[in-house]
Amino acid sequence: MEQDTRALDAYSATVTAVAAELAPHVAALQVTAPDGRGGAGSAVVVPGDGLLVTNAHVVGRARTGLAVFSDGSESEVDVVGADPLSDLAVVRARGAVPPPAELGDAARLRVGQLVVAVGNPLGLAGSVTAGVVSGLGRSLPTRDGRTARVVEDVIQTDAALNPGNSGGALADSAGRVVGINTAVAGWGLGLAVPVNDTTRRILAALVADGRVRRAYLGLVSTPAPLPADLAARTGRRRGLRVVDVVAGSPAARAGLRAGDLVLEAGRSPVADAQSLQRLLFAEAVGTPLPVTVHRNGAMVDVVAVPTELTG
């Protein structure tokens, strides 16, 4: 019993410390679209001049809104840019905001690790829930008009999330923001867009240009283990199995086929969807992209020329 009490005290102390550290950096966000429709969620103060990050589905088509912080202060905000295909958006406060939260790296997360969610579910400001990382590498379908995409490497957590949590912070035990809560997938199941190299580039593009330009290949893929002999030859364990190739796409024109196992793209190893997606930003449009695949027991090199992804 004494041991259980000590463990509970340590757990409680960690959650309490993270909540106290993080809550001042998370705002309740209310937005209003030009047609008068409103939306609400949460937003996190990040490094930059009055910048806050939230979900694209929270801001919708709104251009302005109001951020209310845990100390009662508030500021009108302007939407800088939104990217529905990653479900991320950036807003800028017109007035003073609290100091930014510290951003972490979701690539360092492990299943079972403690995480704490801070947001404003159901309008209850500054709510805190805690749980563990239930899964990593989940996929979240998103859509922008006719363009559909899957956000890869999404964090699954059992920290309770409810409407209004969207756009709030998911933090590790050190109080570093490792994800932006984005969806309630079912009772007791929540998802968060990870904070990693790819999402940092997305946020930088939104701040600089108000949108994200992406290159398009036309591949549908899934992570897959390498056969034992191939793993021994290459020193790698995983690649990307091509599930489908969109007809007429750059991948199809390059000769890529369903069943191919992608090992390299741009001369760099490919082990997961993020490895490929981080190569497909604006600078890749129109630039030859060498791709190495394993097909029918042989290595095959092709060159694809990505086009710009449009709606």
Image (cartoon, helix red, strand yellow):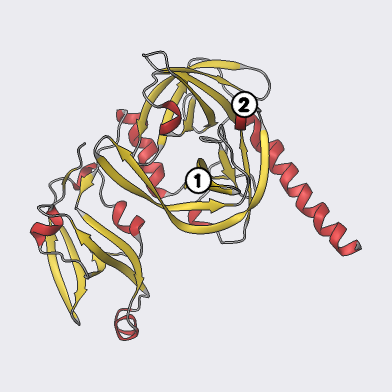
Instruction: Find disc 2 in the rendering and name its residue.
Output: 123
Q: Identify which amino acid the numbered label 2 is placed on.
A: Gly
Q: Residue at x 44, y 25 (%)?
A: 91
Q: Residue 76: percent from the left, percent from the top? A: 50, 15
Residues 217 and 196: in front is 217
Q: Residue 92: percent from the left, percent from the top? A: 45, 22
Q: Residue at x 37, y 41 (%)?
A: 86
> What secondary structure is marked by label 1?
strand
Q: Residues within 10 Å of mark 1 (few under 14, many from 20)?
A: many
Quarter of the image for the C terminus: give it. top left
Quarter of the image for the N terminus: give it. bottom right
Question: How many numbered marks, from 0 up?
Answer: 2
Question: Which residue sits furthest front?
Answer: 187
Q: Residue 78: percent from the left, percent from the top? A: 42, 18
Q: Is residue 46 above or below residue 250?
A: above
Q: Is residue 189 above or below residue 118?
A: below
Instruction: Find disc 1 in the rendering and name its residue.
Output: 192
